[in-house]
Image: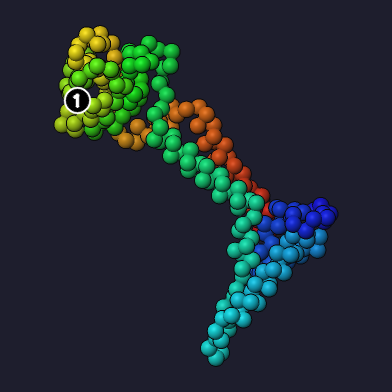
Amino acid sequence: MREGKDTPFECVDPQVGDQIHLLDDPSLASPLRSELEAHLDVCHACSLLVRVDAKASQLLRAGHALPLAGAAPGPVTPSKTAARYTPAFRMRVIAGVAFAACLFLTLTAPPRSISPNAVSRGSESVHFVRPVEGEVLAAREPILEWTSIEGASRYLVEVRNDEGVAVWNGESTETELRVPSSVGLERGRAYRAILSVQPMDLVPPGSISVLFRADSIWKQLLHRVRWADPLLQIVTLLALIAFFASTLPVRRFAQKHS
């Protein structure tokens, strides 16, 4: 353990300081109790925390109604609550929130194309927005979305299976269509959506298309996790590592004295 510092506001050994609330436990093992008490002798921060908790307990007991005759007052241990707000606890909270946010973005944001070097049907200005090339969609009522084409009065979409057979045709004045469940897209099978417009001379026939695979919602989520943006994957992994790393000192310390 390091010697006490000049400042009373920083724990000299956070790994031990995180366990200081265990002193309130009458059944605490002697070796651990001795180590924690020794820590209090050199750590101004933890010593101050214990004194503040003791004063808080005294005030809480004084403010309570008198107990019934023969009944002992319930234990008041605010130190257990205060000890939760340690640097390790704050790290777990921050890392947990970051991981949850990254996971939400991973499951909701469009994934990457499975083959970024492959030839895509369309252009940067006119193309399918959803799905991206090779994306896995839920077989039940998948949504197809594309960029707006100036001058188009109507959009026509044809969906073909991997054998080139048309299984559905739809039209819309908007830039989105939902394939009805009655079409019965087969799970695990690849399909290609082809977009055309009216007037027909705005876009060459067959020039805008996208390949996708119909499957279960579970497979769709797994695909999005696997093909999420690399930066998002890295941040998610770092948040997960930080969350578990913030629990390691407590676990190791507890195992040492178990």
Quadrant of residue 147 within the rendered picture: top left
Image vertical order of residue 174 relative to residue 86, above or below:
above
> Which residue is under mark 1?
172
Q: Nearer the viewer, residue 219 or 107?
A: 107
From this viewpoint, is residue 213 visible?
no
Around disc 1, counting alpha carbons within 10 Å, would you say few (fewer than 14), some (14 to 19), or many (20 or more)? few
Instruction: Report the residue at 22% width, 15% height from top.
Output: 196
Taking the view exactly as shown, the residue that stands out farthest to the front is: 151
Q: Is residue 242 left or right of residue 170?
A: right
Quadrant of residue 28 within the rendered picture: bottom right
Instruction: Report the residue at 79% width, 55% height from top.
Output: 7
- The amino acid on which the numbered mark 1 sits, given as a three-letter code, is Ser
Q: Which of 30 and 146 is in front in this view?
A: 146
Q: Where is residue 37 in the image (x, y as percent from the top left)?
A: 76, 65
Q: In which quarter of the image is the C terminus?
A: bottom right
Image vertical order of residue 179 relative to residue 82, above or below:
above
Q: Position of residue 239 (x, y in %)?
A: 55, 40
Instruction: Report the residue at 19% width, 25% height from top.
Output: 172
Instruction: Report the residue at 54% width, 31% height from top.
Output: 234
Q: Is residue 181 left or right of residue 213?
A: left
Q: Where is residue 111 in the image (x, y as percent from the top left)?
A: 41, 27
Element type where label 1 sits in the image? strand
Q: In this view, does 101 lie to the left or right of 25?
A: left
Image vertical order of residue 204 relative to residue 20, above or below:
above
From this viewpoint, is residue 123 visible?
yes
Picture colour scheme = rainbow
Q: How many numbered marks does the figure carry? A: 1
